[in-house]
Image (cartoon, rainbow, N blue to C red):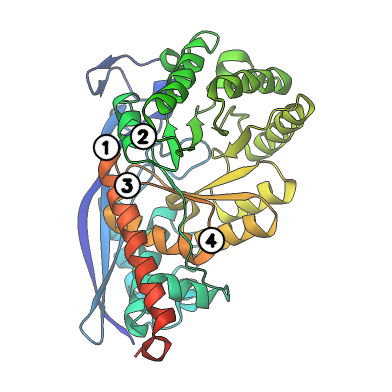
Amino acid sequence: MKIEDVLFAPGLGAFFYDDQAAIRGGRDNDGFFYLGEPVTAGFDAVRKPATSLGIGLVLSNGTTAWGDMMSVQYAGAGGRDPLFDVVAMQQLCEAVLVPRLLQQDVADFRAACRAVLAPHQDGRRLPLALEYGVSQALLAAAAAVRNSTMAEVVAEAFSTPLIARRIPIYSQSGDERKTNVDKMILKSVDILPHGLINARSKFGEGGEVFLDYVDWVARRIEKHGRASYKPVLHFDVYGWIGLGLGLEPGTIADFIARVAERAAPFELQIESPADYGSRDGQIDGFIRIMDALSRIGCNARIVADEWCNTLEDVRAFTDAKAAHLIQIKMPDVGSIADSAEAVLTCKRNGIGAYLGGSCVETDLSARASVHIAVATGADMILAKPGMGVDEAISIVGNEQSRLLAQLARRRAVPSRTNQ
């Protein structure tokens, strides 16, 4: 099956691009707006609407397979690619990608990704947002050729057994960190609440605001959750333990132990407790935090995010055993094939694989993520896109339910598979 034409569809992501450096610097809010000047290159305001670029591959049988390109919410931070520019990205696609795509055979997903997403101009890698969207479209095209699910294509491409197991879903609250927790409890979300602890006002001078919030979440679950409901509490603190208390690993570990006491009886995961400014620094710092936690007998799990972006980064963190769990932030990884390989890399190294992404993604990229998660057996998947909770849970949860139903039928009626 060949590609006969390529379409482009400018669109919107499901949230906003935010200048993390400016927010960390203490920008004030006026309602939903951030005041003051941006800091990170590419931003003309601290907060701006997220954009996306859809790419459609028109196949020789008339089918069009789509994928969506976008940055992440905090583009340009933590070693990430710069802010997404729809016009520049489409121009690059037309100049470099379209000639590669036309007449490309899409039946072999990984081979098509390698051919189409090869480096350009003196060996430079294509923008990761571009890789992400184009690889989604190539995966959808391969599934269309085979009359199968995208999960089955991935499992075959990576020679992994496809176990139709439900992947736990992790929901993020955004700034509505209390109302949205109530929604999560009502819907019995597996992992919650993220919390968006991205500014001093949310952490407190010595962490007391954050500690009180953790305690409130745990007690809220005990008050309103079903007796059998035992979610994992996962908080993303955007480096604020280190920013607020200093980067000494023992001090950070002691504070995390206090958080774990407030979170009890629920399991605790802390994402990005500190930012050490580089990949090597982050690996070394996280190893020392984990060692300190072990010494004091705290079972909280440390989750890597900043400075762990590409597949190469994931390999560096897993080789060093520098986290209990790694967020594979899919738009930052690039090719969706690399995200699949990143999950498998974590599993081979005995490290948890959190298949994540960003609130600024689209419904299309979120649904594709479900197929990667199920095919590779990820440990958890982010409910995305957006910050509204309900929509993201519906998109990811329902896609997973539909996929598992299809896979169950494949097992029950094997003679009809791929007919």
Residue drawn at x 39%, y 54% as measured from the top left: 129
Residue drawn at x 32%, y 60% as measured from the top left: 399
Badge 2: residue crowd in 10 Å (few <14, some 14–19, many ≥20): many
Q: Is 398 displayed left or right of 76 in the figure?
A: left
User: Residue 162: x, y in percent?
Assistant: 51, 72
> What secondary structure is marked by label 3?
helix
Q: Earlier in the sequence, mark 4 or mark 1?
A: 4
Residue drawn at x 30%, y 39% as measured from the top left: 389
Please tell me which residue lies in front, 21 or 267: 267
Residue reaching furthest front?
227
The residue that disc 4 covers is 377
Q: Earlier in the sequence, mark 3 or mark 1?
A: 1
The residue that disc 1 covers is 388
Q: Nearer the viewer, mark 2 or mark 3?
A: 2
Please tell me which residue lies in front, 344 or 165: 165
Q: CA distance from mark 2 to mark 4?
A: 25 Å
Position above or below: 12 against 102: above
Quarter of the figure that contains the C terminus: bottom left
Q: Is 110 displayed left or right of 10 in the figure?
A: right
Q: Nearer the viewer, mark 3 or mark 1?
A: 3
Rendering quarter of residue 341: bottom right
Q: CA distance from mark 2 to mark 1?
A: 14 Å
Rendering quarter of residue 193: top left
